[in-house]
Image: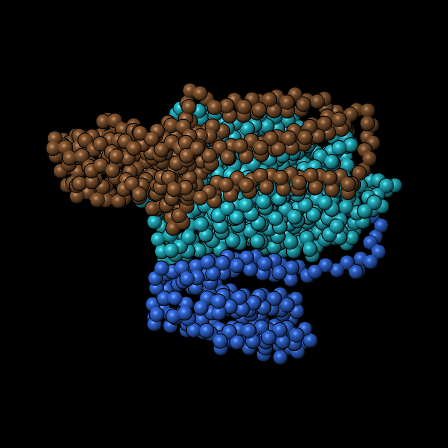
Amino acid sequence: MTLRTKSSLCCPWRIALLIFWSANALWALAPDPSSAHGTNIFNPTSTPAKSIADLSLFVLVITGIIFFVVFVLLLYSVIKFRARKTDDGREPAQVYGSTQIELAWTITPILIVVVLFLATARVIHAIQDAPEPAGAVDVIAIGHQYWWEFRYPKLGIVTANELHVPVSNPDHPTPTFLQLLSADTDHSFWVPELAGKTDLIPNHPNRLWIDPQRTGIFLGQCAQYCGVQHAKMLLRVSVDGPEDFANWVRVQQGPGVEDASAAAGRRVFEDNACMNCHRVDRTSADGHFGPDLTHLMSRATIAAGAAENTHDNLRLWIQNPSAIKPGSLMPAMKLSDADLDAVVSYMETLN
Amino acid sequence: MSAITTSFPNTAEWRLPYRGKVAMACLIVAESAIFTIFVVAYLFYLGKSPSGPTPREVLETPIFYTICLLSSSLTIHLAAKCQARGIGFAFLGFWLLTIALGGLFLYGTAREWHRLIYEHGLTISTNLFGTTYYSLVGLHAFHVTAGLTMLATVAVFGLSGRREMIRSDYIEVLSMYWHFVDAVWVVVFTVVYVLGR
Amino acid sequence: MASDAITVPVGQVQARPWVDELHQWVTTVDHKRLGMLYILSALLFLVVGGVEALIIRIQLMHAHNNFVSPEVFNRMFTMHGTTMIFFVAMPILFGFANYLVPLMIGARDMAFPRLNAFSFWLSFLGGLLLYFSFVGGSGLYGAGNAPDVGWWSYAPLGARAFSPGHSSDYWTLSLLVSGFGSIGTAINIIATILSLRCPGMKLSRMPLLVWLNLVMSGMVLLAITPLSAAQIMLLIDRYLGGHFFDTQAGGSATLWMHFFWIFGHPEVYILIIPCFAFMSEIIPVFSRKPIFGYPVMVAATVCIAFVSMSVWAHHMFTIGMNSYANSFFTLTTMAVGVPTGIKIFNWIGTMWGGRIQFKTAMLFSIAFLFQFLIAGLTGIMMACSPFDWQLSLSYFVVAHFHYVIVGGILFAIFGAFYYWYPKMTGRMLSERLGKWHFWLFLIGFHMTFDVMHIPGILGMPRRIYTYEPGRGWDTLNLIISIGAFIQAIAILVFVLNLIISYFNGKRAGNDPWDAWTLEWSTSSPPPAYNFAAVPTVMSRRPLWDLKHPEDPDSRYE
């Protein structure tokens, strides 16, 4: 039986890895000022996200301490108790166990678990069981393959993919409460800087609330695999100041624009199968399978964030949705160029 | 390789459970888990069918056939005892009676399903009740059928005079399975015909 | 191979024609051969699953990449997950259990050798069936495609309406078939352990590997069966018009989730417990001390088995359960960390005061301890359900479970290879190639899976075939992908080692590691009948007693 000694070759590698790991973590976690509203869970702007971030830091500190202690013990044992050439084949003392030590390292983790659990339970209740105050905005979010439908029942608004909510003053909070439904498969509403994610499950309504305290655009996307274009079911939440929000509501509540110059395009829209899926106010189109297009031009993106709302993208989308989002459920309409141009002109009047 | 250490004082007393019984016990545990899931689904969906026949409207409690099945547990127990004592004729008689009672139970299930399908229009695709009812009762009936197949195999050996193929160990294992099937029926019966209505 | 009698010198036995040899292998009921068949088939699927992972990583190297279409990508992650869990990890662990358990308890074979063979071939058939979907699963999108519903096949995505064609059916059937094989093996292992132990081997004297495989098999009986039940329900929905998970008819999507995770969570413990078993055999031998706290290790494992049956909904924190349910599962999930942590402490306690030899098997074991610790701690983070509302369904959780499965399970399996390959083949694996394998794999593993936590924190969800530029995910994904390739190279080195050492490795002898359990008392490889005379044991380390008659373990137990 040969004994092999090993210098502390493992040691520098372990430390290097540790430094690499921590540096990455720290670098990544620091909010990047250039993308003020990114998708960093440690850059929260709304109470649910903030409570989660605070609790998370507490958990990270505790787990960090545990890691440090155990890692040091492991490292120490690997270095101190390595076989040396001077052992000459003797076996070390055969120790079978120790009841006191076992008790110590059973009781301590149990206590840690109790502390962590109590801290966590508080936050669970604070977020999930929060009552809805009187001034809250109500939104019904319905998940579709692969777009979001947003309805504001009390305001009479129906829109798609881009959610507008008022900024909330912590002294007089005006949160937004979303009821989450689904028209087909499971989805998940995740805007990291505003709240943790909650799933949209058919036949199982859920509830989510946010009270963003800064204006701006907040990004997110569907987080529950829902099919081919799950990756392109993006979310765009616009947190507006009180005036901007009131303006937006007024526009959305307003009737559909009737622009005589786009009459040809409107006829193409109504003659083709477009109206089977889409709704446009003040026309005969009243489909519910696809997004409501009444105020299409008030949105910055189309196809649930897959492309910017520009003339070229709109034209490409109508001509061949698979060019932008292969597998999306909108069929290529196979319109002639003239019809296509007319319809796009019509779409561009829908403010 | 010689013995590892000095000989174990009483090697003759080193008795471990019979592997067949251990295996059958494990199988019963596993099957119980499967049945539990189907029972949970049944209970969860009670009262949730949006349309179609409800349990109260269409189910008739199969008392007679349940008695048949539960008695077959008694007869198989008696058969096992007779076999252990070497009374071949009685063993075979009770064994065949067990098979007959089990077969009668299956016939009862078939009759009930026929009535449900043709008189009440309840199929597995009608509503949640239909789906969960046929799945649960059908799963049980499948296990009864599998059991009857095994019992029939033993009966064939017995009837053709190959008595030495029928060992007490095997009979004990098979009767464990049969008792399990009956126990499952007690649960299914309670859930479907008692609680469900 | 194993059929040579140990007393006949190698070279004097006339080699059989290869057709005969193949026939022997295909019809074998010998637990050692079946064990090796399990391991070899798992290695094959490991390579296939690895290629699928590389395809995923290439596609994700930068934003809006076009390496594969979204349809293909979705099939890749579904097949990767399904393959790795069901056709790599489970078979390889069953293979080691098959090989080692009878040897360690002094038995000649498993309790039911033919059931053993049947179970193996069922598992293998399941794997073939899954991959047949590439040619057989017709659907609206054209002839032949693999399942693309994720390895959980959440309802209603798995229903006929959303998964037309047969791709989902291949997923369902292959898992159903191999599930029955797993149940058969579990029954076999339990019956073997309870009924075939050699005289003197009371339950309190069994090696920990045997104990842990007993616990694992018990869990298989209770965990695989809910999945089988759910899959039967899914087939009823898809083919008989049933409504179990049909939300349009009042069915519940969340019911599938509960059933799936009642299987899915214990499943991951089923995968890790045999790896704990490997660690409990390898670390003592290379520390030259017995395992610290044997009774506690057994109790902790049984505790883990029970508690792990009550934590399943921590995979469902985001589905909208009420706050009481979320709190309950938070508590149980944190609680299961306690016995798990105790085991880590006991392994360190085993090394403490020892004379550690840094053979390749031990290197993998030490890395296991480090990585499993981290994996457990990220698990605690996600046990905290509000934190999980951010981390779930993102790359953080992907990083966590790969840390467990690759950093924990795969490292432990590599350790087991280096430790028991000499017993199985009679040759030592090259230590030099082993060290290359270890360091390359370690670097690749950490490059990929340490970094992978960060995109999760930065909001990157999982199962997306591409992502938007400007979210800060690009460079990170590139680094992750490079690490994946380094791991692939390390696996190649490993496979090379397996092959080269088989022909050129140093002859191992009975007991190359100076170990203490019964398998090291046989020749390498053991004869078909394992032991010439059934041994009798007086302690947990029978070979220690033999080698140290002045200080036997039996005096202290």
Chain seen in brown: A
- Residue C275 placement (x, y as % from top left): 63, 40
Q: Is residue C306 above or below residue B77?
A: above
Residue at (66% x, 40% y) in the render: A111
Chain seen in blue: B
Q: Residue C370 vs residue B185: left or right?
A: right
Q: How many labels sit on residues? A: 0
Place residue A293 in its image quadrant: top left
Q: Colour of chain C?
A: cyan
- Residue C547 placement (x, y as % from top left): 82, 40
- Residue C203 placement (x, y as % from top left): 73, 52
Q: Would you say residue A350 is visible in this rendering? A: yes
Residue at (47% x, 69% y) in the render: B193
In front of the other: C30 or A80: A80
Place residue C242 in its image quadrant: bottom left
Residue at (66% x, 69% y) in the render: B168
